[in-house]
Amino acid sequence: MSQENSKKTLINWDLVSVNPNDKNWNWTDLFCFWGVNIQSIIGFSLIASLYVIYDLNSLVVFCGTVFGSFLVYFFSNLIGKPSQKFGLPFVVLLRCSLGVKGAKYFGLLRCLVGIFLFGIQTYFLSKAFGYLFRIIIFSIDQSLLDQKIFLTFFMGMNTIDWISIILSIIFQGFLFSSGMNFNKKIIVFSAIFVYVGIFIFFFSVLLSDVQFTFQAFLNNLNYSNLLSVKNIGPIITVAGTIFAYFSIIILS
């Protein structure tokens, strides 16, 4: 293609191949990246709801969760391995089979998914900031939250909510503009912090009363009719729910 006939729409430095010298992510970095994606309040709430709210057999939920996780693992590697190997975004690899214009439709789909993800994480991050601000204000003076400035609402949010969501957007903008090497450090630190917290919580519950905790765990295991035909539907449903929840990560 001559320089004169080149299209400006094809020139995008975000789509060029990554310099091999900059491909410095090892398996621990990728593990931490995966960990901070799946270890979330939403994910834990989903799994807990399958156990508690819907009163499903614990082993059925466990088997369905494992089956759904393997599906997510398979498709994530199927999509991500070529991009990781050649240092190209997946949408660029699709140009081989769909052409430039065909790949743009999948790029648009990933754009919509990214907007959706940004909205979700902004919402939950702003809620976390809001709860933190309320706790700090309440600890200083319990009557401050009853002041008029904190009871004025606009579009369903009060002053604390607006400050929290604006702070969340600014904070995420800082992370987006800091580069991947800085974000990699944040991801590794966050994953280590999360998993250490999980192990501390697990051992604190277990060691509080080992016999009671162990017996409660055994009581939740129901082996009766595990291989029954009636359990095939619930297992597929749980696996589909897990796959649907993590499909947004596969698309992004």
Image (tube, grey):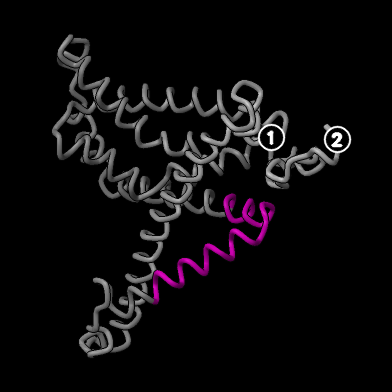
Mark 2 is surrounded, within 10 Å at the Cα level, by few (under 14), some (14 to 19) or many (20 or more) other residues, namely few
What's the magenta region? 163-188
Q: Nearer the viewer, residue 246 or 191?
A: 246
**C-beta proximity under 8 Å, tags 2 and 1:** no
Q: Nearer the viewer, residue 30 or 170?
A: 170
Q: Residue at x 18, y 22 (%)?
A: 222
Q: Nearer the viewer, mark 2 or mark 1?
A: 2
Q: On the image, numbered disc 2 is attached to which residue? A: 2
Q: On the image, numbered disc 1 is attached to which residue? A: 88
**How many dots with numbers?**
2
Could you say which disc has been placed on residue 20 in the image?
Answer: none
Using the image, determine if residue 153 lies above or below residue 56.
Answer: below
Whether residue 196 is in magenta: the answer is no
Q: Secondary structure at mark 2?
A: loop
Q: Residue at x 40, y 69 (%)?
A: 165
Using the image, determine if residue 130 lies above or below residue 103.
Answer: below
Q: Nearer the viewer, residue 249 or 64?
A: 249
Whether residue 187 is in magenta: the answer is yes
Q: Residue at x 36, y 45 (%)?
A: 202
Where is residue 251 shown, x and y percent of the image? 48, 35
CA gap between label 2 and label 1 equals 23 Å
Q: Amino acid at mark 1?
A: Leu
Q: Secondary structure at mark 1?
A: loop
Q: Is 190 on the left or on the right of 117, as rendered?
A: right
Q: Residue at x 45, y 44 (%)?
A: 113
Where is residue 100 shown, x and y percent of the image? 64, 31
